[in-house]
Image (cartoon, rainbow, N blue to C red):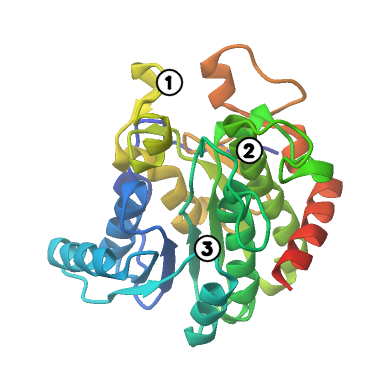
Amino acid sequence: MRISTPFTAQSTADEVSAGVDLTGKRAIVTGGASGIGVETVKTLARLGAAVTLAVRDADSGARVAAQITQETGNPNIGVRRLELVQPSSIAAFVAEWDGPLHLLINNAGVMAIQERTLTEAGWEAQFATNHLGHFALTVGLHRALAAADGARVVSLSSSGHLFSPVVFDDINFSFRPYDPQQAYAQSKTAVNLFAVGASARWAGDGITVNAVNPGAIATPLQRHVGGKLATPVELQKTPAQGASTTVLLATSPLLNGIGGRYFNDNQEATPVNRRPATIPELVNAVADYSLDPGNADRLWEVSAKAAA
């Protein structure tokens, strides 16, 4: 049965988490120093969590953390450097983490890099950042998540996933002409499939993993497309609204024990076997191929080899 909640696309992160107490809980938010990552951290901080911002620029992260502490009164906001396309950076981050981890928000990402770009390991950059880096981080933190007895992982996806499955035989566009949208789309399909694969493997550890489409919010994510949103104005969100579904999945008792699913606008999305023709339908849909257990297993095998 699909999950529904009393919240809407206009609900804010604070509204969907009203009454939740995260005192004593520990959280990591990747990309927590910009865009909706900041709003996510603010809300978790207001709820009493100790939050670590995992960011590329530690100096910028420290400034944001200080501002959040000042605004929320929560002194337990820390910063650690993390570069998602550098395995050594991920390994160092994981090695430095000690103790349980209750919430992992895989928020960082890139969108629509205009020219084909490969990492040092030879992976297409959007796939490497949006999926492979977070895969390695989450798997590396598995023991900490299991120790939390009921940990939640929330990974940010996009309705863009409806424009391409993971093309397993050509993930890196070695044979196809590179297309920024297609590359972004398959990376976000991978995010959905990771939620399916991780939830299936880790349910016995009390860990749930879900994917979320935050919606259309003007943030630095759009820098490769001129900072413009293609979504109609009436469907665009503020950062506080954009962070709401992430925070709902991370904190709400309505989601206890729920994993392997994809949500948008604070509701579980409708599965479809073809791409919808209109933007409102697109926003509320999730592609069947992005929740398929067979595809999830295949992706897990590819990702585990990449992380080895």
Q: Is residue 277 above or below residue 231?
A: above
Give me the C-alpha separation between circle 3 and circle 2: 17 Å
Q: Secondary structure at mark 1?
A: loop
- On residue 84, the disc is 3
Q: Which residue is mark 2?
A: 183
- On residue 115, the disc is none
> How dense is the environment of label 2, judged by Cα within 10 Å: few (below 14), some, or many (20 and up)?
many
Q: Which residue is mark 1?
A: 230
* Disc 3 versus disc 1: nearer the observer: 3
Label 3 with label 1: CB-CB less than 8 Å: no
Quarter-of-image position of residue 50 = bottom left
Give me the C-alpha separation between circle 2 and circle 1: 18 Å
Is residue 261 among what the camera can see?
no
Residue drawn at x 40%, y 41% is 221
Give me the C-alpha separation between circle 3 and circle 1: 27 Å
> Could you tell which of marks 2 and 1 lies nearer the N-terminus?
2
- Residue 269 in the image, given as x and y percentages of width and height: 61, 33
Q: Amino acid at mark 3?
A: Leu
**Is residue 123 found left or right of 70 in the rendered image?**
right
